[in-house]
Amino acid sequence: MIHPAARFTLDGVTVDFRESRAVENLSLHVDPGELVGIVGPSGAGKTTLLRLLNGAQRPTTGAVRVDGNPLESLSARELRALRSRIGFVHQDHRLVPTQRVVTNVLAGRLGRVGLLRSLRDIYWPGNSEVEAVHSILQRVGIPEKLFERVDSLSGGQMQRTSIARALYQEPDAILADEPVSSVDPARARDTMALLTRIAREEGITLCVSLHNLDLAREFFPRLIGMRHGRVVFDCDTQELADTHFDELYELTAGEMLRSS
Amino acid sequence: MKIPAARTIVLVALLLAGLASAWRLDLVPTSGSWDVFGRFIGAAFAPTLTSQSDVGSNILPQALRAMRNTVIFAVAAISLSIVLGAVLGVLASARWWRLFPAFGPLRPVLYTAARTLIAFMRSIHEIIWAIALLAAFGLNTVSAVIAIAIPYGGTLAKVFSEMLDEAPDDAAQALRMAGAGSLQTFVFGLVPRALPDMGAYAFYRFECALRSAAILGFFGFPTLGKYIYEACGELYFREAWTYLYALFVLIVLVEWWSGALRRRLTVA
């Protein structure tokens, strides 16, 4: 099953927060079906970049376009429709811990239906919906957890549940913000393999921010390096030299103190 | 060093206020006798199932009926309170109104109206509501249920609104980012995050409702309070204690039940 994939364009985007500048004059282009890793130290603007791509963050200046449509011109309804096609995987999962896995995954499709229909879909789902969730859980490797409560799962299983929720959207793109920073290295590798495999199978666009450079190099054909809200490099992984990474993580004395 | 000093001043002031009010109220019984009170305490160790008024008859069936009535009144009252509390709790939640920018300047008006109504309902005790409703409708079962449901509904609404406003909004944010609308975000992201706490609190209020239902027996409703009041009036303290222990048993049972349920609701 191949979906149309999303195309993202950033044109001279700057985002100012109250105290600081999160990203500065960012321009980049992500083609449909591309797998992009975004690397850089904490505070580099990786999360802001991902949030710009689905309209969760508005640019202070500049324009964000998805499939050629500038986000600032979309109505609330159109923005909802767009977001329902973009899955977002959060570092901290953002699930409802006292509900079952199936209920949490079913919530992925809220963007497509009205309130009454969604009440039925989530609290009294039909067999076909439950089966659809089950087959997605199979793909992410936790089919036996279908009716388990989320708060009985391990961190890795919660991460998979939140990936399943994004997949249940049948998205054109998945944006994942540090999806593996809270799991052990073996699980991190599994999760990366899972995300990239699914993106390839579905032919959808995938943008993932991550700390781990080895994982980034292993799984993504294209890497964007960010630091202090700017793009330091943006190229094919094969063309990357070690000096690129040195530049990215070259710490100032102040940063070293903070990170120790 | 400054903070402990301030704390000492506050503590001393509170102590002085307590002593002064006791002195002002002249808290020494000048009439009656410690003897009667002593008999009341003594009867606690000798509750009886044999009626002291109607000598020889067994009061167990009556005690059980009174327990059943107390539970029925409390269940009816708390059910109505939960409905009132849920509706008003949502309307008094800041997050709810933040979801509807379309209401514009009407939002603070509606929010304040809901909070004022809640404060009014809560500020009048169920006994006062009962007196008013009895005057209006007579010794009617509905009077007792509504008398409890008004202040309880207000209290539940206040606590529910705070729980909704303080629940983690992580899931709600995730749903919003997946395209969910405002109502959906509230219903599927926020409410489930607050629901375990809301359920646990509603159960605690059910315990309180049992006590209130018992007390309303003082007005003649056939709950435990009616028989406690009658027995005490005749100084049949051993009989009164039987009913008091019956109330105690009810409260302990509900506490045990709600504890078990709370563990299921909140802990993995």
Image: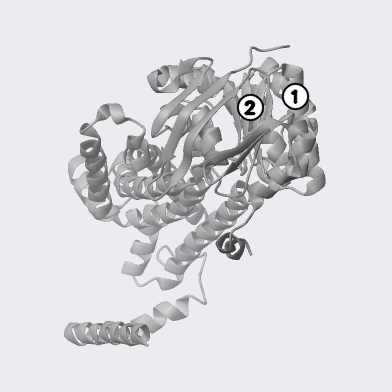
Mark 2: amino acid: Ile
- How crowded is the residue under tag 1: few (<14 C-alpha within 10 Å), some, or many (20+)? some
Residue B126 can be seen in this image:
yes
Nearer-N-terminus badge (1/2): 2
- How crowded is the residue under tag 2: few (<14 C-alpha within 10 Å), some, or many (20+)? many
What x and y, as percent, mark residue B235?
35, 72
Asked where in the image residue B80 lies, by quadrant, the reply is top left
Mark 1: amino acid: Ile
Query: How many numbered marks have been drawn onto this rendered protein structure?
Result: 2
What x and y, as percent, mark residue B182?
42, 28
Secondary structure under the numbered disc 1 in the rendered image: helix
Relative to A222, B232 lies left or right: left
Judging by the rendered image, the residue that carries numbered circle 2 is A174
Q: Would you place residue B16 above or below residue A210 in this image?
A: below
Query: Do labels 1 and 2 touch, CB within 8 Å?
Result: yes
Residue at the outermost right position: A186
Secondary structure under the numbered disc 2 in the rendered image: strand
Task: Name the chain under label 1.
Answer: A
Picture disc at residue A152:
none
Q: Would you place residue B39 above or below residue A130 in this image?
A: below
Identity of the residue drawn at 75% across and 35% down: A192
What x and y, as percent, mark residue B130?
26, 49
Judging by the rendered image, the residue that carries numbered circle 1 is A198
Nearest the viewer among B237 and A6 is: A6
